[in-house]
Image: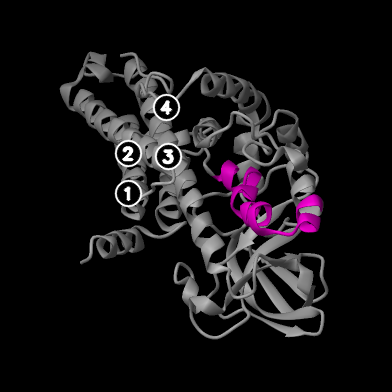
Amino acid sequence: MNISFDSLQLSSPFYTESHHQWRAQLRKYVDKEITPFIDDWEEAGEVPLDLWPKAAEIGLLQIGYPEAYGGVSEGIDIFHTIVTSEELARCGATGISSSLTIHGIGLPPVANYGSDAMKEEVVTAVLAGEKRISLGITEPGAGSDVANISTTAKREGDHYIVNGSKTFISGGTRADWLTTAVRTGDEGLGGISLLLIPMDAEGVSRTKLDKKQGWWCSDTATIYFDNVKVPVENIIGEENQGFLPIVHNFNHERMGIISLSLAAAKVCMEEAAEWAVERKTFGKPLSKHQVIRHKFAEMLKRINATQAYMDMCAWQIQNNCLKIEDISMAKVQATETMEFCAREAMQIMGGISYMRGCKTERIYREVRVMAIGGGSEEIMRDLTSRQLGL
């Protein structure tokens, strides 16, 4: 049985030598700086702060961002970001991406809609690994239902006064800035703005959420705003026009979840295959039992189908013809494939897969956050049905 992470990479016309070179470079970094320590970081509930400057040294943080602010954009496309997600997930902990690359959802609104001064200050520092930024959308009473956020930002002179809270914020306990959805106008989508809030501002407080099922190494927080004064120039884009950059961001967040979920499924299959070859039952390797071989065949079918769907969605994004129903259903398919492969891998490995230190054990716990984050499976199906006119 010859099953490895690389052998599970479906041949695709979208990946060029540039993507393969980036994969090789990033793999060396992950194998040296992340994989040997991930179990300890999971138990500690955080990753060391020096991981960000190290990531910046190889271009991991900068990929896809403007070169004027220290980014790497020439010759870079969305398939480079997919490769990034896949290689980070090879360590067997998808939470590392939620921590180390959380700027992937917090920084794009600033880079795409922020003022020049804001970009110079924020984008440059984040890409250098010196500062961190997160995204604040979800509230105790509003998650994917962005139209009903209640955190307010009322203008008083040359400042906004912010009151409210955000919760389940990945990277929230260590963020220097929060790209925050606030209500500056009337009810509904037309009253929403994006505001860059410094996390050291007076009136900002945070509570660490550390009793999580998965993503232990990714810090998560509830953030409170009590009459926080934020300069008017910290508005990202136009006032009451925050919904468009939020939606634009959602699509990239979902692509990240798709690629992470698919990579996690491959990790489970690879780990189960290694075990099945070595483990002997009833006088022969576990891999020689037909019921086990069929499990691997079914995992491969779902992995290949998911990668083909993911690659087509990425191509759509790159060519500005993305269908919302496609990325919505691709996310559902990816998280379901991750869940299926994690379950089947655990069935193949048996008791050892129930112990910490087994990649599949961790991935099985991480399924639910992937299926909920970025828009739950139920919301993705409802969004798709509406796109179909139903």
Is 386 part of what is drawn in magenta? no
Q: Nearer the viewer, mark 4 or mark 2?
A: 4
Within 10 Å of disc 1 (Cα), the crowding (few <14, some 14-19, many 20+) is: some
Location of residue 315 in the rendering, given as x and y in whole percent from the top left corner: 41, 37
Residue of label 1: 326
Q: Residue at x 34, y 51 (%)?
A: 323
Q: In the rendered structure, which disc, 1 or 2, sits on the residue that comes first in sequence?
A: 2
Q: Mark 4 or 1 closer to N-term?
A: 4
The kind of residue on which mark 2 rests is: Tyr
| Label 3 residue SS | helix
User: In this view of the protein, which residue sits in the foreground, 135 or 96?
Assistant: 135
| Relative image position of residue 75 (x, y in whole percent) | 59, 28
Amino acid at the residue labelled 1: Asp
Query: What residue sits right under mark 3 in the picture?
Result: 314
- For disc 4, the marked residue is 14
- Asked if labels 2 and 1 touch by Cβ distance under 8 angstroms, the answer is yes
Question: What amino acid does circle 3 point to?
Answer: Ala
Residue segment shown in magenta: 95-120
| Helix, strand or loop for disc 1 | helix
Under circle 4, the secondary element is: loop
Q: CA distance from mark 3 to mark 4?
A: 9 Å
Query: Which numbered disc flags the more N-terminal residue, 3 or 4?
Result: 4
Is there any visible trace of residue 101 in the rendered image? yes
Q: Main secondary structure of the magenta part?
A: helix
Q: Are there few (<14), some (14-19), or many (20+) residues within 10 Å of tag 2?
A: many
For label 2, the residue is 309
Is residue 141 visible to the viewer in this orientation of the structure?
no
Name the residue: 55% across, 21% down. Answer: 18
Rendered residue at 39%/48% (across/down) = 322
Inter-mark Cα distance, 2 to 3: 9 Å
Q: 60 or 266, which is in the foreground? A: 60
Residue furthest left as drawn? 290
